[in-house]
Amino acid sequence: MEPLIDLVKGLEILEPFLKRHGFAFDNYENGKGSGGQYTVATYKNGRKKFIIGFRFSIGEIGYEFDDFVVGHTFYLDHIGVADKKQFPDFQSDDKLLAFRHILHDFEFIVDDFFNGLCVKLIEASKLEEQYIKEHKAKSQIEYNNHFEEMKIERARQKFKEKEYKSSLQIYSTVGNKDLLNELDKKTIEYCEKHM
């Protein structure tokens, strides 16, 4: 089966529920990413959108209210039903089973998203955005520290080779001085004395 055919069959499982709650099909968007072709289907009801991304199975599910967007897993975890949700965070061989799991999970957000004012969605969206910012910042720090640690290792190697000037020069390029241990500090002192 081709991915779009699987998506259409899966959406047939969700559409009766979506229509019952005032959502109408909006559009398909096709694109190409690092993993190949993908399709995003959108359903709308006024200021609300249900978004589902599909490659070879469901890759993403999102809920949108005005400018607030939250992913399926984060939303359900936020409202406290992480242990009751059925949709897994991984791709399955049974493409239609995943759609049935989503349909099951809709029941947890029917009062907030489908029939309500999206109060929990807005809370979850803000928290998810904050989480992503913090995760990106942490990842950037880890990335930067990795290169700093490589510099420190090179400086240590130059010291072992008795190239004190090169060692000191490399140590001077380390921006995060917290990564230098006591031995590094003594090494720097030694290099400064023996140049």
Image (tube, rainbow, N blue to C red):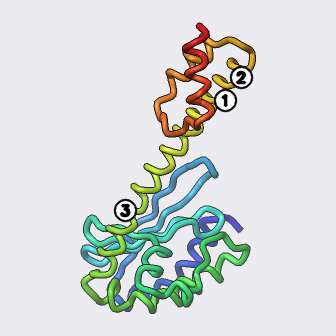
Spot occupied by residue 165 in the image (x, y as percentages of width and height): 60, 10
Residue shown at 30% from the left, 67% from the top:
68
Helix, strand or loop under label 2? helix
Mark-to-mark CA distance, 2 and 1: 6 Å
Residue shown at 66% from the left, 76% from the top:
95
Residue shown at 48% from the left, 44% from the top:
140
The C terminus lies in which quarter of the figure? top right
Q: Quadrant of residue 48?
A: bottom left
In this figure, which residue is indicated by the disc labeled 1?
A: 153
Spot occupied by residue 55 in the image (x, y as percentages of width and height): 61, 62
Say few, some or many: other residues with alpha carbon within 10 Å of mark 1 (under 14 / 14 to 19 / 20 or more).
Answer: some
Q: Earlier in the sequence, mark 3 or mark 1?
A: 3
Helix, strand or loop under label 1? helix
Residue shown at 55% from the left, 21% from the top:
189
Proximity of marks 2 and 1: CB atoms separated by less than 8 Å: yes
Q: Amino acid at mark 3?
A: Glu
Q: Amino acid at mark 1?
A: Glu
Relative placement, left or right, of 129 versus 2 is: left
Mark-to-mark CA distance, 3 and 2: 42 Å
In this figure, which residue is indicated by the disc labeled 2?
A: 157
In this figure, which residue is indicated by the disc labeled 3?
A: 129
